[in-house]
Image (cartoon, rainbow, N blue to C red):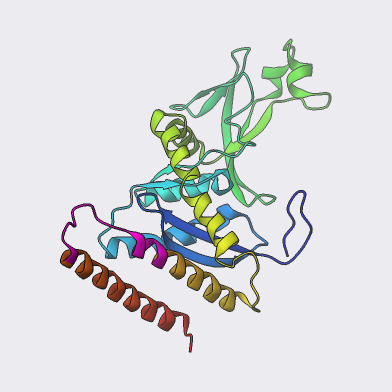
């Protein structure tokens, strides 16, 4: 069961897929239940996809996705896996209170009046299930401050706020996203993954899944992805091929390779 703004409450599957930006080939697809957010499935996708690409001799350097996959845990995980993330930070992300400066070496904030707001503890926010760091001043620091009413409110006597535990990972990712390469990656994402997903839903029968259960939904999605890749592969031509004999041999090789791929996928999906 999933609920999305402006849409009816209903039963859905999340179709998570990854696409090679070079040739728009689907490299991974899987069905998930739609009761969770996209960013909660990214680590599972990367964990399955990276070894498979490495096994076939493909080097994966950059991970491009939309803001729905943004989280500090994901940024840290991708760095651990040796991947550069180009995932825009979620609109709710704040690196600290407005007007406060962060001292990375000493791990504290400096308020507009020059007072140091030190780090106190790491805790888990059970509402969002994420790690955060708490910073808190003392009542003596804030007493008599001309910004006290505006900064603390009516009842608080000290400044207290929390920031994501993965602030450094957020900042590094945001710097990449806002760079020249980041703008290029955004255009690349919009011209690869999104059109592929649109083709699957509009022309490959993925608007509805007429099966029961997650396992059966996975079979439908895999078969749609196989059909999509087959069409891409059969239409692919190499410019260096000139003679008809070489072209025919290349086409036969492609067909043989994809027949083996279909056999492998059917065996994996346990279809009969």
Residue 200 shown left or right of residue 1 in the figure? left
Q: Position of residue 106 (x, y in %)?
A: 46, 27
Residue 157 shown left or right of residue 72 in the figure? right
* Up/down of 53 relative to 105, above or below: below
Q: Which residue of the protein is positioned furthest toward the bottom in this rendering?
A: 272
Which residue is at a point 73% across and 20% down the rendered structure image? Answer: 151
Residue 255 shown left or right of residue 132 in the figure? left
Q: Position of residue 194 (x, y in %)?
A: 53, 50
Which residue is at a point 66% across and 32% down the rendered structure image? Answer: 161
Q: Position of residue 182 (x, y in %)?
A: 43, 34
Q: Give the extent of the magenta segment.
A: 230-244
Of 39 and 270, nearer the camera is 270
Which quadrant of the structure image shows residue 84?
Answer: top left
Q: Is 252 colored magenta in this rendering?
A: no
Q: Position of residue 247 (x, y in %)?
A: 21, 64
Which residue is at a point 73% across and 53% down the rendered structure image? Answer: 4
Residue 182 shown left or right of residue 93 in the figure? left
Q: How many marks?
A: 0
Which residue is at a point 50% across and 37% down the rendered structure image? Answer: 170
The quadrant in which the N terminus is found is bottom right
Which quadrant of the structure image shows residue 227?
Answer: bottom left
* Up/down of 198 relative to 272, above or below: above
Q: Is 237 colored magenta in this rendering?
A: yes
């Amino acid at each position: 069961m999933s609920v999305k703004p402006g849409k009816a409450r209903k039963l859905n599957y999340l179709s998570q897929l990854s696409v090679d930006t070079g040739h728009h080939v689907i490299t991974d697809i899987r069905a998930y239940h739609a009761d969770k957010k996209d960013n909660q499935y990214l680590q599972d996708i990367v964990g399955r996809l990276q070894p498979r690409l490495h096994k076939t001799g493909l080097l994966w350097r950059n991970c491009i996705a939309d803001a729905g996959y943004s989280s500090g845990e994901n940024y840290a995980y991708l760095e651990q896996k040796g991947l550069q993330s180009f995932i825009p930070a979620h609109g709710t992300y704040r690196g600290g209170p407005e007007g406060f400066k962060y001292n990375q070496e000493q791990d504290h904030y400096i308020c507009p009046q020059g007072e140091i707001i030190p780090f106190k503890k790491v805790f888990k926010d059970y509402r969002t299930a994420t790690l955060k760091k708490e910073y808190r001043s003392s009542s003596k620091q804030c007493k008599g401050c001309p910004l006290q009413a505006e900064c603390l409110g009516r009842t608080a006597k000290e400044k207290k706020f929390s920031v994501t535990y993965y602030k450094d990972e957020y900042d590094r990712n945001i710097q990449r996203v806002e760079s020249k390469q980041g703008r290029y990656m955004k255009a690349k994402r919009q011209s690869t993954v999104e059109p592929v997903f649109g083709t699957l839903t509009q022309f490959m029968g993925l608007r509805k899944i007429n099966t029961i259960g997650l396992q059966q939904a996975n079979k439908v999605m895999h078969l749609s992805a196989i059909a999509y890749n087959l069409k891409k592969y059969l239409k692919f031509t190499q410019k260096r091929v000139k003679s008809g004999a070489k072209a025919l041999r290349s086409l036969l090789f492609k067909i043989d390779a994809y027949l083996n791929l279909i056999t492998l996928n059917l065996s994996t999906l346990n279809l009969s």
